[in-house]
Image: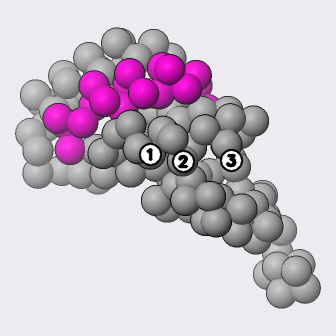
């Protein structure tokens, strides 16, 4: 599996993945992480442009304050969306799940607290 950091200019990001696919082919899965770098419009452009390159998922395409736009973004692309920085607690996960805002959630225990604090929530 290859994870590629993107999130700057959609055209450059798509070109980068195109070149990577040329070099490695389509057997190896590619995951991308936009690091909250795209606006909604940039995310639509980038993800639609990346669709032919068999992307496993895109992690955190936009800033967390745009979470309300994630459900709409999911309708604009076939690339699955993973929430990361948008999820700090089970409340965040529940909110995103209820909104149908993402396909996957990445839970980092270092940002979410230890298991004792999670048990008490």
- Magenta highlight range: 35-54
Q: Which residue is mark 1?
A: 74
- Element marked by disc 2: helix
Residue 82 is left or right of residue 98, and the answer is left
Pointer 1: residues within 10 angstroms few (<14), some, or many (20+)? Answer: some
Q: Residue at x 38, y 51 (%)?
A: 80
Q: In whole angstroms, how far apart are the C-alphas of marks 3 and 1?
A: 17 Å
Q: Quadrant of residue 68?
A: top right
Taking depth in this image into account, of 96 and 52 the one nearest to the observer is 96
Q: Quadrant of residue 119?
A: bottom right
Q: Is residue 33 visible?
A: no
Pointer 2: residues within 10 angstroms few (<14), some, or many (20+)? Answer: some
Quadrant location of the C terminus in the rendered image: bottom right
Pointer 3: residues within 10 angstroms few (<14), some, or many (20+)? Answer: some
Please determine whether, in this image, residue 75 is positioned above or below residue 10: below
- Element marked by disc 1: helix
Q: Which residue is mark 3?
A: 85
Q: In whole angstroms, how far apart are the C-alphas of marks 3 and 2?
A: 16 Å
Please determine whether, in this image, residue 47 is positioned above or below residue 30: above
Q: Main secondary structure of the magenta part?
A: helix
Q: Position of residue 61 (x, y in %)?
A: 53, 36
Q: Is residue 28 visible?
A: yes
Q: Which residue is mark 2?
A: 71
Residue 90 is left or right of residue 17, and the answer is right
Q: Residue at x 30, y 45 (%)?
A: 78
The answer to which of marks 3 and 2 sits earlier in the sequence is 2
Q: Residue at x 68, y 35 (%)?
A: 66
Q: In whole angstroms, how far apart are the C-alphas of marks 2 and 1?
A: 5 Å
């Amino acid at each position: 599996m290859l994870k590629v950091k993107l999130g700057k200019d959609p055209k450059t990001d798509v070109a980068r993945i195109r070149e990577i696919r040329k070099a490695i082919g389509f057997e190896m899965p590619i995951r991308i992480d936009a690091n909250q770098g795209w606006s909604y419009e940039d995310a639509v452009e980038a993800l639609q442009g990346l669709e032919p390159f068999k992307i496993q998922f895109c992690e955190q395409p936009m800033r967390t304050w745009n979470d309300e736009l994630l459900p709409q973004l999911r309708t604009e692309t076939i690339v699955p969306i993973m929430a990361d920085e948008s999820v700090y607690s089970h409340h965040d996960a529940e909110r995103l799940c209820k909104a149908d805002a993402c396909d996957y959630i990445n839970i980092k225990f270092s940002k979410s607290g230890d298991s004792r604090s999670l048990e008490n929530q």
